[in-house]
Image (spheres, rainbow, N blue to C red):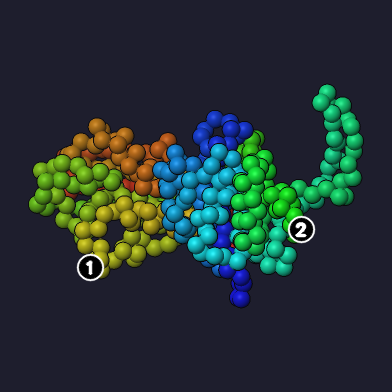
Amino acid sequence: MPNSPRTAAIIVAAGRGLRAGAGGPKQYRTLAGRPVIARAMEPFCAHPGILAVQPVTNPDDTEMFNSAVAGLNFRPAVGGGATRQASVRAGLEALAELKPEIVLIHDAARCFVTPDLISRAITAASATGAALPVVAVTDTIKQVDANGAVDATPDRAALRIAQTPQAFRFDVILDAHRRAARDGRDDFTDDAAIAEWAGLTVSTFEGDANNMKMTTPEDFAREESRLMAALGDIRTGTGYDVHAFGEGDHVWLCGLKVPHTRGFLAHSDGDVGLHALVDAILGALADGDIGSHFPPTDPQWKGAASDKFLKYAIDRVTARGGRVANLEVTMICERPKIGPLRDAMRQRIAEITGVPVSRVAVKATTSEKLGFTGREEGIAATASATIRLPWGADGLAG
């Protein structure tokens, strides 16, 4: 956005989300394999009109937060307060040193925000100083009394559903939050309400019906089904790798350092299991092989840890809007024995890829003393990967 005002964004993610049911804070749950908070933050982190993204989190969630948003570019998270209002004020105070002109305040539970909506928010705040996205009410609304009897039927033509990101001149909304804190007012449910209380005129701009807030278990079930239906292009790839033994006292297998009487002769760490998996994923993407992305002639990969290669392959899937559905590795060797290590290998692959361990398989077989693996001259591995991509990613109709 050329000549746009200096704009920062606050992502409010300190809540517990109790109405979403069991499973931990809702912002860290996954939809189609991706955490809600990552889906909510990424459009802001990638938007050309946003100079800084300030997350506000619960300090107890630090590990979950760092894992969920790894790879995104944002300011260090600050701790939230007991209420949403207190958390927003913490984010505003953290941004004060940057002195942005405009600030967008967004709930992490709204994970379908689009770049266009962010741009509209910046434009609206630049024009009016205080604005929020809204969508029209399409159902008839009833006002009821304490006994559940209808009191009134408001005119829906004058009603709107409020969304985030809500957008303000930074200095004005910071002052309003500070005044509310001094006056002991902590009952506001959104920032537009604080702005109204402070005497500001709050304008509206076009929201997005898809920019819904994830609140209940039914919301998660519905959106999971919708997103998975969109990932209808199912691909399968296979991989194979082999490394000969040389001098050493350990080998790397499926991300684990395994004590052994020999080591691998390899340019990288020689992890045949992970190398085969990388080729399987790249094959499912029709995106070359491990050697084309990490040439063995390139000195920068000398001794490299193979988890880097596997993370790279996973990132290639994510960049296409896809997810990994299943990973399987078969180790072919006489020794070391894979059986006692199988579950640890599955867990390590799950940690590297972000794929649930229930979708990772590690198997083992011998070659009945035949061939180079039977003579214990090296180890081989085969792998398969099933991925799901959105229809239309390659110009194909769904």
Tell me: 191 left or right of 235: right
The residue located at (65%, 60%) in the rendering is 172
**Occupied quadrant, residue 64:** top left
Crowding at mark 2 (Cα within 10 Å: few <14, some 14-19, many 20+): some
Determine which of the numbered discs, if any, sits on residue 299 in the image. 1
Decide if residue 174 is in sight here: yes
- In the image as oriented, which residue stretches furthest toward the front? 182
| Disc 2 from disc 1: Cα separation | 61 Å
- Compared across the picture, whether 21 is left or right of 140 comes to left
Please give left or right for residue 144 compared with residue 11 in the image.
Answer: right
Residue drawn where x is 61% and y is 61% of the image: 170
Q: In the rendered image, which quarter contains the C terminus?
A: bottom right
Identity, as a three-letter code, of the amino acid under mark 2: Thr
Indicate the secondary structure of the residue bearing disc 2.
loop
Residue plotted at (54% across, 42% down): 81
Question: Where is residue 271 drawn, in percent x and y?
Answer: 25, 50
Query: Which of these two is toward me, 191 or 28?
Result: 191
| Residues under numbered marks 2 and 1 in contact, where contact means CB atoms less than 8 Å apart | no
Where residue 84 sits: x, y (%)?
60, 43
Of residues 302 and 215, the one nearer the viewer is 215
Q: Which residue is labeled 2 in the image?
A: 201
Of residues 392 and 352, the one drawn nearer to the viewer in this rendering = 352
Q: How many marks?
A: 2
Q: Is tag 2's residue or tag 1's residue first in the polypeptide sequence?
A: 2
Where is residue 239? Give x, y as percent.
Answer: 35, 52
Location of the N terminus by quadrant is: bottom right
